[in-house]
Image (tube, grey):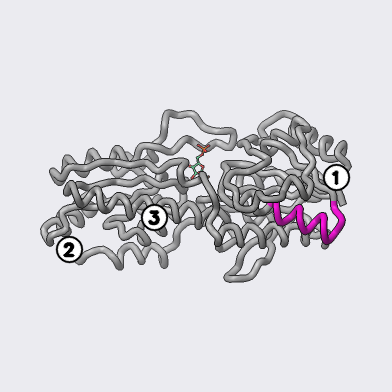
Amino acid sequence: MRIGVLTGGGDCPGLNAVIHAAVKKGITHYGDEFVGFLEGWRGVLDNATVPLTLEKVDGILHLGGTILRTSRTNVRKIEGGIEKCVQTLKANKLDALIAIGGDDTQSVTNALIQAGVPGVGVPKTIDNDLNGTDVCFGFDTAVMIATEAIDRLHTTAESHNRVIVCEVMGRDAGWIALTAGVAGGAHVVLVPEKPIDLDHVCAILRHNHDHGKKYGIVVVAEGAKLPDSGAQATRGSKVDSFGHPILKGIADHLAEEIEKLTGYETRSVTLGHTQRGGTPTAYDRMLATRYGLAAIDLVHQGRFGRLVVLHGTKIEDIPIADAISKNRTVDDSFLSIIQSLEPKL
Ligand code: F6P
């Protein structure tokens, strides 16, 4: 078969491991040929391609980023975009398309499937917020990077008797904040799923201070809502082609408020894209490899319109339409971990 592959949306550690696995198994076990589209859906619109051979994917498994590069191109917002993509795929004589991406990318895959394109999806996002899968590859690496950063913040905060507010990614979901915050022993963890009670935050910091811990680490998800307005902190009003604003600034805001309310010297740190860069963890390499192998098997079974997912320890598949129907946010059982670790005030 001739198969197209693309990576769309924000990059994430493990993308190359998916490409590596799908292409390697496709060529050696099924005798496939692969066409890589450059820069996500933009490459399909512009017919910008690169042959994906065994030589091309050799040695890429452990590399961060994506050899195909990526973009946030919303084909559905472009007049005639879907038809243009269908034409490109036909012109390349493709029998199938593997789209590696999060909900935005998969919403385009789904539209193309409805237009008759034989496509399958692989779930990617450091935010871990794609519905229908327990884990997206990239999340583990982002959490590891954030946890290491939080570990480092402890020592400098303690040396100076400071509070440090650390902002992590995750968009509207608090998975990175919760997991890295708990793993990194943060004293306060704030997520978009729960309104921020600033008095409660300050009460915890004061309690710790009065009990000998004169410093504090607060981990906040970029998408958590500002306590005064209930809105998310954004960099201006610009949105991307999928309607997402640039989330930024909640840590700065909280640091100012905490210092004002407690009198403790407070600093803020935004981890930003460091969480998306660099090499994937062993867990993400393995998960991405399993996803890539499952995707090429789905193609050969003719099971199009499906997304490979992780349920427990098993790789399964679900309709792409289900995955994009809603976001998977932090639920009460996970939120209760935060409460359970807070001091009794
Ligand atoms: O969706 C992944 C993500 O890293 C979010 O956590 C973050 O809000 C966003 O992408 C940043 O997007 P960009 O790379 O376009 O600034």
For image coordinates 26% across by 63% down, the residue present is: 342
Q: Quadrant of residue 50 in the image?
A: top right
**Marks 2 and 1, Cα distance to the nearest angstrom?**
63 Å
Choose mark 3 or mark 1, whichever is in front.
3
Choose mark 2 or mark 3, whichever is in front.
3
Q: Quadrant of residue 66 in the image?
A: top right
Range of the magenta residues? 19-32
What label does residue 94 carry, if any? 1
Q: Would you say residue 108 is visible in this rendering?
A: yes
Seen in the image, is 93 located left or right of residue 59? right
Q: Is residue 6 above or below residue 26?
A: above
Q: Quadrant where the C terminus lies? A: bottom left
- Whether ligand 1 has any atom under 8 Å from the Cβ at mark 2 is answered as no
Q: Position of residue 343 (x, y in %)?
A: 22, 64
For image coordinates 82% across by 55% down, the residue present is: 27
Residue 304 in magenta stretch: no
Name the amino acid type tagged 1.
Leu
Q: Position of residue 28 (x, y in %)?
A: 82, 58
Q: Position of residue 26 (x, y in %)?
A: 80, 56
The residue that disc 2 covers is 345
Q: Would you say residue 129 is visible in this rendering?
A: no
Q: Position of residue 266 (x, y in %)?
A: 21, 42
* Crowd rating for badge 2 (residues with CA inside 10 Å; few <14, some 14–19, many 20+): few
| Sequence order check, earlier mark of 2 and 1 | 1
The residue that disc 3 covers is 147
Name the amino acid type tagged 3.
Thr
Name the amino acid type tagged 2.
Leu
What label does residue 161 carry, if any? none
* Crowd rating for badge 1 (residues with CA inside 10 Å; few <14, some 14–19, many 20+): some
SS for callout 2: loop
**Marks 3 and 1, Cα distance to the nearest angstrom?**
42 Å
